[in-house]
Amino acid sequence: MSEAVIKTEKLTKRFGDFIAANEITFEVDKGEIFGFLGANGAGKTTAMRMLCGLSTPSSGKATIAGFDVYKQTEQIKKSIGYMSQKFSLYEDLTVLENIKFFGGIYGLTNQQIKTKSEELINHLGLQQEAKKLVVSLPLGWKQKLSFSAAILHEPKIVFLDEPTGGVDPVTRRQFWDLIYDAADRGVTIFVTTHYMDEAEYCNRISIMVDGVIKALDTPRNLKDTFHANNMDEVFYELARGAKRGE
Amino acid sequence: MPIIWTKYFMNWPAAPNAVNKLIDMKQILIFIRKEFAHVLRDRKTLLILFGMPIVQILIFGFALTSEVKDARIVIMDQAKDAASKQIISKIAASNYFEIDKTVRNSQEMKEALKQGEIRLAVIFPANFYDDLVHQNEARIQIIADAIDPNNATTLTSYINSIVQDYQMDFNKTNNIPYRITPELRFLYNPELKGAPNYVPGVMALVLMLVCVMMTAVSIVKEKETGTMEILLVSPFSPFKVIIAKAVPYLLLSLINVVSILLLSVFVLDLPINGSVLLLFAESILFIITCLTIGIFISVKTNTMQVAMLISLMGMMLPTILFSGFMFPIENMPVPLQIISNIIPAKWYYIMVKDIMIKGLGFGAIWKETLILAAITMVMLIISLKSFKIRLS
Amino acid sequence: MRTIKFLLQKEFRQIFRNKAILAMAIVVPVVQLLVLPLAANYEVKSVSVAVIDNDHSSYSQKLINKVTSSGYFKLTGYDFSFKQAYQLIESDRADLILEIPQGFERNLVRENGQKLFVAVNAINGTKANLGSVYLLNVIQDFNSDVRLQFIQPGALNWQPTIDVASSNWYNPLLNYHVFMVPGILAILVTMIGGFLTALNIVKEKEVGTIEQINVTPIKKYHFILGKLIPFWILGNVVFTLGLIVAWLVYGITPVGNLFLMYGFIAVYLLAVLGFGLLISTFCDSQQQAMFVMFFFVMIFVLMGGLFTSIDSMPNWAKVVARFNPVSYLIEVMRMIMLKGSGFKNIAPQLGYITLFALVFNSLAIYNYKKTS
């Protein structure tokens, strides 16, 4: 019996006349890896920002880990992790300092921070780089570090906004290993991506077109429904009618 | 048109060259139009570009006067007789002073001076009138808050002349012998307004800001965003890129010059006494100087932030310091006075002052023009040289 | 509290790691404090006088001697025609023309009165004003000398005179450094506090790290405090450095209570940092923030009474000055450092600054949105 940790009902965000996200309704279960796909400008980031409490919805309902996105944004923030499109650790701090800082502001105890950071650095194999400034790391490591920082406080849900943009295939593979590890520990993963091979790694995916969710199912079912050989074809089928885009 | 074409054919060796030039001009015009689009689209910067001179002219022209008035003073009148009261009412009637209050003892006076708003205390000792009539000599004491030395000196001398005045009235019956009456005339600026001094300075400052900072930043921006490379791989020559970048700022600067002059004539009541044409000619020379400096900075830097910092710290600050309109150069230590000579704004400021306020002609400022032209040439050669080095 | 500790740790690390910021915060103010007072010397000490002596008498000679020996004037020459003298004014080689008319001595002796003509280049109002004041004083002195010479010793006091004795308090030597140094220190503290705070937050916006902070459960006021405290400390460091420079280089030591000075600076910095924060909430790029700050700092400095006294400004400018925090600091700095004013004297200014601090910071907190 699974429980839904993300629930939305007709969630909408308007900017003036422009409807960035239009009546989005879906549920994500605990421990699930949920892929959130869509073309550029389809409204993915807007939707994700609403779920993270960074942006107040215009209408509709949503609860994250049981908390309301209108009134309980601060409680939501305690139970989620977030990794944005832009790399967002402090480049002028060292790896260790970044981990300590984010651990600290999420209220981890000093002991927890210590064991966690050791664990993390060993896990990522960053022993040599622990005391180096983040700015000197290659992009792939930065992304892995970002992800690790986002789940440092053991959130129930982690939101990843195009986490693997500009990263080589090998590093992407390693990144997904980290995601699976986290999912195995019961963390719910909510991820947006442009890579269709990554979409196949997800338990379920939704495809957004022009602010509306056009499809939502497991990758296998979607392929069957659209009589497609791979996710690329499914995506193309749905997204080519899009009016918005960059 | 046909006539021109036949001319080309008649004189055929010159034709390709001339046609090329025609095409060149068209290219440059297209480019200039693009630059204008950039400049005009950035509303916030545009607001600063045109708002800054207006605000500066208003502040400098109205708020900063060297004239002293409405200084708050306290009176300690221990005499309270006819003479002291008359002098006090004379002080109260003058525009220079505003009597804040009267104090009873020196303790209260000290407190009042410590309060900060009181610039001066006038003390009449007891028996002031008696002394004046019977001893033929009376004494008034002035205590000035001398933290601002010039202000203190001026205020003291004003009180002095009010007292002199009173003395004259007092002695009206007896004619004072051997009297010298100085007749004072303030040339160019009878009301001692700040504007005649500041307006030429603001012009120098604004042109500097617009031409140096804006040109440097806009060229470096193309470097930073990578569009410069696209321009460089196009058949358009890099020199033309630079020239096309500079033209919009030249025009914008001229608009600024016009708006400053209009403001000063119609709002500040500061007429242009000399030749407007000469004023514009010298302004164009100074604008070109600033543009070459801006181009030089852009060649030497790679990020907007650095370009901005250098323009601000390296050009704006020295301009404010050494052009002579804010800080008197003659009072500076000799090394600073020498440095001031290489600041282009100093020469421009002198010329604007001479043309606009004193109404002098080219004969009086040819030396300054020459110096400015020389600085421009040197800057131009240096920046073209470093530009070439960059390209190879 | 623990959250703030972590925020502070992070800010300090970043500040100390960024050499450019450290240089901007420490070296630049010290250099400015060394250079600016040298440049900002408005002392009027050598006014150039061109004399047109049409009399060539012993009296005109004496008057010229009196002018040159007063110490305020530099004689350009004394045998000009009016046209020549006027050209000297035009070319800035003379500030003043003193014209002694023909028959000066004769008229003075025989007719008991004579006029003198003084023309001043008044483009620079301060210099014109003081130059003419000095010259008039010299002429007056000369006048009493002449009178003394003619009036019989027995009748010396036949006419009542009022003697005006003036003394200059707080700055008896009329030294310009005394006037400028505390004011410049006030400006520096303002610039450092305002600029660094505004740029720092806008940088987090630009880089995107602020978004990462916004998804964490830290409170608004935690974040703002985490930004305020480091720059507040930095402002105090800059102020202390400035005091040391003022003491070592200019020999200016605070007459008043140092604790009172620091107390006022403490509140003032809160106001300025709050202003920086407020600006940062409106701006999206460091370039914009810099422009906006530059604009305001320019107005604050020019209208803060650093160079020209606020008393002489027109009424609208006085109203603007009321809303200018810098004007209060410049005033209070001069009061405490030079006059030894006490708490009672600066209480009104402290009140205004507290109000500024409250308004700026609450606006900044209100305007800083974790959620858009």
Image (cartoon, rainbow, N blue to C red):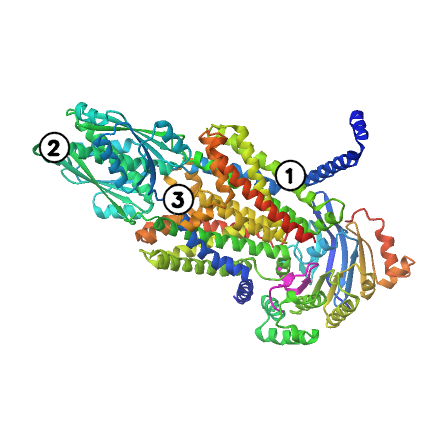
Mark 3 vs mark 1: which is more N-terminal?
Answer: 1
- Pointer 1: what residue? B247
Membership of A138 in magenta stretch: no
Tags 3 and 1 both on a single chain: yes
Tags 3 and 2 both on a single chain: yes
- Pointer 2: what residue? B133
The label on residue B126 is none
Q: Tell me the crowding category of disc 3: few under 14, some 14 to 19, or many 20 or more residues within 10 angstroms, Cα based.
A: some
Check the image and report above or below for A105 versus B182.
Answer: below
Quarter of image, res A100: bottom right
Mark 3 vs mark 2: which is more N-terminal?
Answer: 2
- Pointer 3: what residue? B330
Q: Secondary structure at mark 1?
A: helix
Q: Amino acid at mark 2?
A: Val
Q: Label 3 marks which chain's residue?
A: B
Percent x, y of residue B328: 41, 43
Which one is in front, A134 or B183?
A: B183
Q: Secondary structure at mark 3?
A: helix
The residue at 30%/36% (across/down) is C133
Separation (CA) of disc 3 from disc 1: 37 Å
Mark 2 vs mark 1: which is more N-terminal?
Answer: 2
Q: Amino acid at mark 1?
A: Val
Q: Amino acid at mark 3?
A: Glu
User: In this picture, which residue range is highlighted in magenta?
Assistant: A74-94
Q: Are marks 3 and 2 in contact (CB under 8 Å)?
A: no
